[in-house]
Image: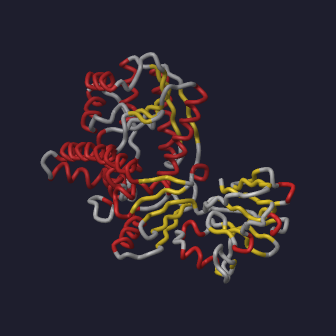
Amino acid sequence: MEDLFKTHIRSKNILDLNKSYLLAISGGIDSVCLGHLLFRSGYSFSLGHVNFQLRGKESDQDEAFVRDLAQAWNVPFFVKKTNKKQFMSSGISTQMGARDFRYQWFDELLKENGFDGILVAHQFEDQIETVFLNLLRGTGIEGVYGMADKRGNIIRPLLPFSRIQITGFMEENGYAWRNDSSNYDNDYKRNLLRNRVLPTLSEDFEGGLQTLDLSFKRLKDTGKAFFELFETWKKDHIKSENDYQYLEISAIKSMPGRQSLVYYWLRDYGFSYFDVQDMLQSIDLNVLGKVFYAGQYILNKDRDLLILGKNDFEWDPLEIHLHDIEMNTKNLKFDILHLEEKFEIVKSSESAMLDLEKLEFPLLVKKWEYGDRFIPLGMENEKKISDLLVDLKVPLIQKKQVLVLWSGGKIAWVIGLRISEEFKCSQSTKKVLYFKKI
């Protein structure tokens, strides 16, 4: 195994003889095996051991055993004693709490001592267990990726090596190790896989775990192809504008694999696979105005579009005084135009030209409210803003962000949509207050 280990390290360029590493060591067979291989291969490393004191004397004996190894190898030894109260937080298992605590401490040691990486002794069966657990959690195609040889500061030199190979190396060389009695507690899901499921697969199916590993690698290649396809699809179909993302429903109406494509677009914003499933069902059933929430994000199924945006729009009422006019504020730009003869009215929903003499200061910019009404340009009677938004087919996700400009208790402009008939410019207008949405 030693020769295979050296060949693997060289071929993957995982370790460097000129660098220094921190070996996360428990005293168990895998981490002790890795320590011996590192020592025999001439690598520079230190040992990091956490005593969780979960197994009484056994935990202290593990610590003493690892301390003796450090002396035998003549390498620095770091130890951290803790208890369950210090590493447990609500809602997670003892195993996960211990894992998080351990990695956090190892990361601190790395930064304090300038190590070039943290070595952990995950091996072949650990990889198979991880993939199984990922798939059982519903992680999808990424679940078959398992653990990488190297990711960030974490390095796993033993991933290709099986428990049989590791045990053989240790026994052939007469090396001792510690057995953790908690590894046989099948209340833990990983232990259940390790002690019952995987041995059965190895014994009752030809090829056993090796065949599984080959299948996982093929699926991993398929996953890589899918994600390349996804990036191309995303570039072609997801459009971004004014803090919103848009996807035309026609692009996914009958597309094969659409649920996975849409899921990988939305998952980074907190949406689940089941959210996407429900949303696609609303498309198939032609349900209008369907809305999904995920933290600070909102997804709106409008008529022909899926619209993604933030659900945290806030606007404090803003007063505009006459002496403020020649400056910009928030997302409005405004200025006074002095008119002497003919002028041309700018026709744009993003801007407004209002007769300055009809306005009453201070003006007020605030979010619209249900019941607000005004007389839209070109009309004689009042109209509710809510009805205007329906007529203009403003998507639900954007309705919440509509602002209005008030003057003397009347709405002068539904910003970005329509000005009021009462404040429009005419041929007798001498001064124009020009607003532009920016």
Query: Visible in this render: residue 278?
Result: yes
Query: Which quarter of the image is occupied by the N terminus?
Result: top left
State the residue lying farthest toward the left.
Answer: 206
Q: Is residue 331 above or below residue 292?
A: above
Residue 25 on image: x %, y %:
45, 34
Q: Nearer the viewer, residue 235 or 77?
A: 235
Q: Is residue 320 above or below residue 208?
A: below
Q: Residue at x 40, y 33 (%)?
A: 150
Tell which of 374 and 159 is nearer to you: 374
Q: Is residue 438 left or right of residue 90?
A: right
Residue at the far bottom in the pictured view: 381
Quadrant hosting residue 252: bottom left
Q: Residue at x 53, y 24 (%)?
A: 76
**x%, y% of residue 434?**
73, 57
Q: Is residue 197 left or right of residue 39?
A: left
Q: Nearer the viewer, residue 236 or 72?
A: 236
User: Can you say whether 285 is above or below 44 in the image?
Assistant: below
Q: Percent position (x, y) of residue 213?
A: 23, 44
State which quadrant residue 423 falls in.
bottom right
